[in-house]
């Protein structure tokens, strides 16, 4: 670590490449809110395709400022108010949720609403590079099961007991989620793969009722987890801007869509964010079985729900790929790294159809 930074500086952008914001405006806002912005430089985190994240110091402690990217924001995405509510509820009762420090819904301060939360030290599991040569079959298996443990803990929280009922509506989660991603698909400027409308039409004929309702992260994957660099035990789960009340199987499904396998379409494997293909890693079927065994969610209805939500999660992934590819098409120079998502989208929709036909899990 350089100077007194609490993390590897390689995780931060070169200051010359960072998206700037008004430090003076932030300092004035925090002062009026009873906080103090320390004099340390503001550094933007590298990586990520959504919110902008900055390492700052507030009241003598390291913190993270999060705000949406510039431009049009899809409905329900990059919701800092939602993330603030979720962390305010979860951090007192679950150790993996960082504590919020401040939230500002006044877009005139920095150009968008923003959230400041505590910084959790550790190793972010972005992509397959953080562990590199340290990866072993035993470690790959442990990382696989760590995801199941995290979701089991989160889904085991009683929404009413912890005051989380305000995070979402009690019914209609599957229908609302399907409708939302269908609308986003229709709004894509990119050429929509032929499999996409077929997948969403079939999902519309198979929408389940709300059999189970828990607090869900709603975008859970391994690269949203921070681990201790020595023990590799989880120290935080990040990115709560889509958290809600919903089916726990949608969290499991989202995790599985990002858990690529060797026989996935090549374009889909190219965006793999995990160590899923490392020797020793569990496959999707084994991960799903581990979750079912840990939770006891093993009825025939549960099995059908998991299959529906896995197909929907692949549809969601396909739409996200199209949205990211739209940015590349609009500004190839700025969004060069998004080009690969154009080739990934068809494979995601095709995998969704495979799930509905009885495959993958």
Image: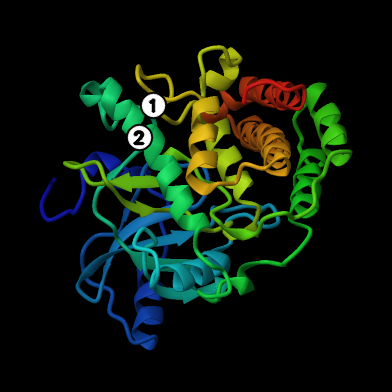
Against 86, is 178 above or below? above
What label does residue 143 carry, if any? 2
How packed is label 2: few (under 14 Cα within 10 Å), some, or many (20 or more)?
A: many
Closer to the N terminus: mark 2 or mark 1?
2
How packed is label 1: few (under 14 Cα within 10 Å), some, or many (20 or more)?
A: many
Say if mark 2 contacts mark 1, CB within 8 Å.
yes
Q: Position of residue 351 (x, y in %)?
A: 68, 23
Seen at 22% across and 21% down, the residue is: 133
Seen at 58% across and 61% down, the residue is: 79
Q: Position of residue 60 (x, y in %)?
A: 19, 73
Residue 196 image-quadrant placement:
top right
Q: Label 1: which residue?
A: 275
Q: Secondary structure at mark 1?
A: loop
Seen at 53% across and 27% down, the residue is: 284
Residue 227 image-quadrant placement:
top left
User: Is residue 112 among what the camera can see?
Assistant: no
Q: Position of residue 155 (x, y in %)?
A: 52, 56
Q: Position of residue 107 (x, y in %)?
A: 56, 71
Q: Judge by depth and name the residue closer to the eye, 180 or 211.
A: 211
Q: Secondary structure at mark 2?
A: helix
Against 26, is 239 above or below? above
């Amino acid at each position: 670590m350089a100077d007194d930074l609490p993390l590897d500086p390689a995780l931060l952008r070169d200051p010359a490449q960072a998206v700037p914001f008004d430090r003076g405006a932030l300092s004035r806002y925090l002062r009026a809110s009873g906080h103090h912005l320390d004099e340390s430089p503001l550094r933007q985190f590298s990586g990520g395709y959504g919110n902008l994240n900055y390492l700052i110091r507030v009241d003598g402690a390291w913190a993270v400022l999060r705000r949406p990217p510039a431009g049009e924001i899809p409905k329900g995405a990059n919701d800092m108010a939602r993330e603030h509510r979720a962390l305010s509820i979860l951090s007192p009762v679950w150790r993996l949720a960082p504590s919020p420090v401040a939230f500002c819904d006044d877009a005139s301060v920095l150009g968008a609403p923003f959230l400041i939360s505590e910084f959790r030290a550790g190793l972010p599991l972005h992509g397959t590079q953080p562990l590199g040569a340290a990866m072993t079959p035993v470690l790959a298996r442990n990382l696989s099961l760590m995801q199941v443990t995290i979701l089991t803990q989160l889904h085991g929280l009683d929404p009413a007991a912890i005051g989380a009922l305000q995070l979402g509506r009690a019914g209609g989660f599957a229908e609302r989620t399907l409708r939302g991603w269908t609308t986003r698909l229709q709004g894509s400027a990119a050429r929509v793969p032929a499999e996409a409308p077929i997948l969403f039409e079939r999902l519309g004929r198979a929408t389940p009722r709300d059999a189970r309702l828990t607090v869900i992260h709603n975008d859970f994957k391994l690269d949203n987890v921070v681990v201790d660099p020595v023990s590799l035990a989880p120290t935080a789960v990040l990115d709560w801007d889509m958290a809600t009340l919903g089916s726990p199987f949608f969290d499991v499904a989202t995790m599985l869509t990002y858990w690529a396998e060797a026989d996935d379409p090549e374009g889909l494997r190219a965006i793999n964010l995990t160590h899923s293909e490392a020797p020793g890693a569990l496959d999707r079927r084994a991960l799903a079985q581990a979750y079912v065994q840990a939770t006891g969610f093993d009825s025939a209805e549960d099995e059908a729900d998991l299959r529906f939500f896995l197909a929907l999660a692949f549809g969601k992934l396909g739409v996200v790929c199209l949205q990211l590819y739209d940015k590349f098409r609009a500004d190839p120079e700025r969004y060069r790294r998004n080009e690969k998502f154009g080739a990934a989208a068809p494979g995601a929709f095709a995998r969704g159809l495979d799930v509905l036909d009885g495959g993958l899990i």
